[in-house]
Amino acid sequence: MKTKEFYSMPEKTNENSLLASAQASLDKAARMLNLDPNIYAMLKTNERTLTVSLPVEMDDGHVEVFTGYRVQHTTARGPGKGGIRYHPAVTQEEVAALAQLMTWKCSLVNVPFSGAKGGVSVNPRQLSENELRRLTRRYTYAISPIIGPKTDIPAPDMNTDEKTMTWITDTYSMIKGESSGEIVTGKPVSLGGSVGRINATGLGVAIAAEQALLRNGCELNKCTAVVQGFGNVGTWSARHIADRGLKIVGISDISGGYYNPKGLNVDEMVTYVKQSDTRSLEGYSAPGVESINNEELLSLPCDVLVPAAMENQIRSDNANK
């Protein structure tokens, strides 16, 4: 017999973690669906979790050891599908939660993939391009036994991009002794990648925001937006939202937040990041721009808020602000 107690979070889970949040969503759905306990038992756990140690030679000759993960939530619907992120806060628990969420995403749009995710605990802004390349090749080699075009297909995520996917493709192809461009998505178009992929998520955000505003009778040129995060998703979201006539009054990245009630110059900020040694907005300034922290940014008055940074940014303690 199914009971409320049966659908519960696993033990040893931080109640404020992303995994706890993902599990709570699964529990709620299971109760609403009166889900078979046997199916629930399989869905609440991951099919496979791989933790790898990644020794990498730095440019000065010393070796740093990083920790990487690849989690496959399930392969019931087809190959695992999910990105690889580079961030100092990456943990096994976070990657496990993201893998579970990928299962729901793929199922929702009915594509023949299952959920997976990967990550390395590293601050990529502190590594040179050569160091990042060596790290990526080491990580690819370490997870190669469990990935493949018919088993698990990685993709870009936070702080990884087309170049990262090129390194993965090259390394995996060398391991297999044949060209294996199908091992990843998100690679350059010249290597078989999809046209428009790089800005697709940001465009989707802008279209959703535009339609929500129009359905509520709002005039786009009188609306404001705040974008938290200035990576791939945040950058393209800001660009496409601005193209629709909204005023972008706040933007943040790892260096902090930037606010101008009269509007920020998104293209100027994109150019600044591209030319910055830190690959961030650190040190950015312009007339009328005020530096603020992340909590202040999330509380700015606006019509559209785009949380395009880390997960769990909107919580019970700040949702009403």
Image (spheres, helix red, strand yellow):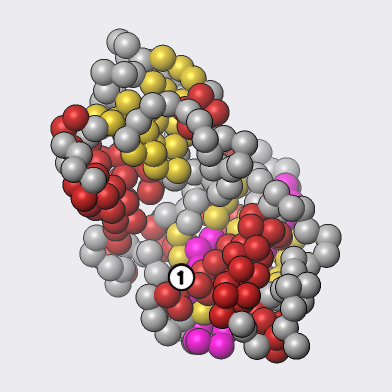
Mark 1: amino acid? Lys
Q: Main secondary structure of the magenta part?
A: strand
For this view, does 37 lie left or right of residue 157?
right
Compared with residue 233, is residue 44 higher up or lower down, i.e. above or below? below
In percent of width and height, residue 203 lies at 26, 53
> Image point 33% across, 18% down: which residue?
260
Could you say where residue 291 lies in the image, as x and y percent from the top left?
A: 46, 17
Image quadrant assignment for residue 92? bottom right
The x and y percentages for residue 37 are 70, 86
Most extreme residue toward the top is 287
Picture residue at 49% right of the left edge, 48% below the top: 159
Q: Quadrant of residue 97?
A: bottom right
Q: Is residue 319 left or right of residue 8?
A: left
**Mark 1 highlights which residue?**
105
Quarter of the image that includes the N terminus:
bottom right
Query: Is there any visible trace of residue 296 in the rendered image?
Result: yes
Answer left or right for 12 relative to 77. right
| Label total for image | 1
Decide whether residue 149 is among the magenta residues.
Answer: no
Relative depth, front residue between 64 and 314: 314
Instruction: Residue 191 in the image: state x and y as whole percent.
Output: 31, 69
In the figure, 204 relative to 11: above or below?
A: above
User: What residue do we see at 48% from left, 56% from top?
Assistant: 157
Residue 304 picture quarter? top left
Label 1 secondary element: helix
The answer to whether residue 69 is magenta is yes
In the rendered structure, which segment of residues is drawn in magenta?
A: 63-84
Front in this rendered view, residue 207 or 275: 207
Asked whether the viewer can see residue 141, the reply is no
Q: Residues within 10 Å of mark 1 (few under 14, many from 20)?
A: some
Residue at image point 32% right, 26% down: 249
Residue closest to the eye, 267 or 98: 98
